[in-house]
Image: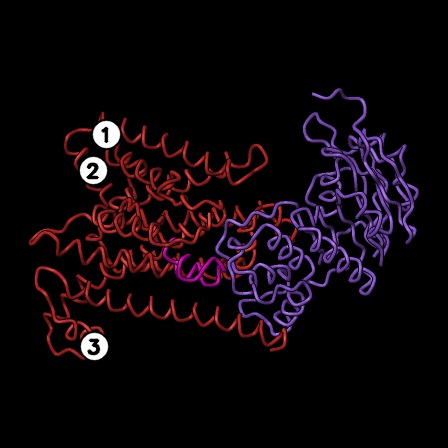
Chain colours: A purple, B red
Amino acid sequence: MKIETEGVSVHYRATRALNAIDIAAHPGEVLGLIGPNGSGKSTLVKAIAGIAAATGRVLFGGEPRRPEVLGYMPQDIGARTALTVLEVVLLGRLGRLGLRVDQRDLAAVGATLEELGLSRLASRFIGELSGGQRQLVYLAQALAAEPPVLLLDEPVSALDIRHQLEVLEIIGRLTRERGLTTIAILHDLNATARHADRVALLKSGDLIGHGRPADILTAPLIARAFEVEAAVSTGADGHPIITPLRALGRKAA
Amino acid sequence: MSPTDTIHHAYGQLAARRALVLAAGLGALVASGLLDIATGPAFLPVSEVARSILRLSQDRTVDAIVWTIRLPVALIAIFVGASLGLTGAIMQTILNNPLASSYTLGVSAGAGFGAALVIVMGSFLPVLGDQAIPVSAFVFAAIACAGVFAIGQTRGASAEMLVLGGIALLFLFQALLSLLQFIASPEALQLIVFWLFGSLQKATWTKAAIVAGVLALAVPVLVADVWRLTALKLGDERARGLGVDVRALRLRAFVLISALTGTAVAFVGTIGFVGLVAPHIARIFVGEDQRGFLPASAIFGALLLSLSSVASKTVLPGAIVPIGIVTALIGVPFFIWLIVANRRSYW
């Protein structure tokens, strides 16, 4: 299901958070959303998810209607609740749940937990888990409903590098295998270069680059967006490798 | 074990625990209800009470005591306790706050003000007669609920705004109540104080049926929203992401809270502690999957008030201590023990 935004803008009172954004995300591909803090990445994902009031149009498969099932994973991984991992992931299938839980729903949750290596944590309370484990549980929740669309707000920010790698590979594999349209906010430019099929670069609510990683993750665009001087080379596998060198335009404290 | 077997096993354990806790709670509630009926100026053997309830007793005096006097009191204790436990659970869920209850967020204070207003000023609708006090208490509980909801809609309609609105209204209604007490005659003052203590002794079959009826009406609404309420425990944004219309859900919940608290408090006065403590007991035993949490909160609320009713008739020989005082005296030490002894942190 292709996702397109047409002139999507968001205002928080007098502040402009997003300014007429046009992007497209394609089935079977991961669109990496990058940009400095406060550039509007989360706001754009919320606008696409339909939970931030926006102007402009968001099209899902050409239709201006949010699909019934949508895998949205917000940034917040708080867990002030006495719910088990199993119950949290089950909530991902909210629209289909009745008072009695269906065998199919349980099987889908079981498969998702297994996929992310969480089966042994099924009966644990979510509040008892580490931040990284909680992030995986919420990813499982987003995946549990087998949605056509995945909207992930920093899905690996609390994970160590091994888990980051594993989770990004799982997201990429499921995206390709299931033909999902995935939009993921990422901070690590090298991870973006490796795991995203396309990249959208935001700065101060404006889209300043949208295309293949090699076309967007360039020294001039990185300097413009992040105010960082970076050396960009090409790795043996053809992906860009970004080495940040120094901050631009600001004196050291 | 395959992933499917593992998950079925884990889910089976959760479901079994939930069923066991609810069954044990109901069993304890039946026992407590029987004990409540047996207790009074003339203590009746529990077996005799059970026979009378089952219409097997030959003793007309026992039947008269049980059916005319004590059963309505015991039932209203159970139904009001269940209403208060349930409203506390709904409030703690929709506000994501363990301190929320109709008592701590101004709804009961609104009802108290409504009752006192009629006691001091007289009935604004003379046709209501004796029912003017409960009607006014119900109306002001609804006004307080609407006020909390209206304040909560400002500044992003967050749970925090609703809690702040509730606390503000609690102080407002307490101040208005104090003002009424200040200007009241000594006789009216005495009536207000007695009403605020809470009492089960004016229970009738009609009142018990009304409270039970409102509870019964709340059940299908809660069943329909049970998963959406569970989703709200993960925060507003995540619930919205899962497709929940958070504002509409909160509005439905507030209407229920208003009706349940309004009827409960209107007939028995302000009883503070049940709505706060019952959900905490339920949370410890069954977690916050609302399919277990809501019924368990209702059962534990009913059990708490039923046991308090027994205690209110036994602690001072020859006297019935007001129920509101007893619930706090029993509930506070128990509650403190509960939260200190339970090491799991959910909030």
First along the sequence among labels 3 and 2: 3
Number of the label disc, if any, that sits on residue B296 = none
Question: Gap in Å between the C-alphas at discs 3 and 1?
Answer: 47 Å
- Vertical side of B22 occupied by B148: above or below: above
- Vertical side of B198 occupied by A204: above or below: above
Asked if labels 3 and 1 share a chain, the reply is: yes
* Amino acid type shown at disc 2: Val
Where residue B38 appears, as percent x and y from the top left, is 15, 66
First along the sequence among labels 1 and 2: 1
Residue linked to disc 1: B181
Q: Secondary structure at mark 2?
A: helix
Q: Chain of mark 1?
A: B
Tell me if label 1 and label 2 are in contact, CB under 8 Å.
Answer: yes
Task: Say if residue B263 shows up in the picture.
Answer: no
Residue linked to disc 3: B55
* Amino acid type shown at disc 1: Gln
Q: Which residues are magenta?
A: B278-296
Where residue B224 appears, as percent x and y from the top left, is 54, 60
Q: Chain of mark 2?
A: B
Residue linked to disc 2: B193
Q: Secondary structure at mark 1?
A: helix
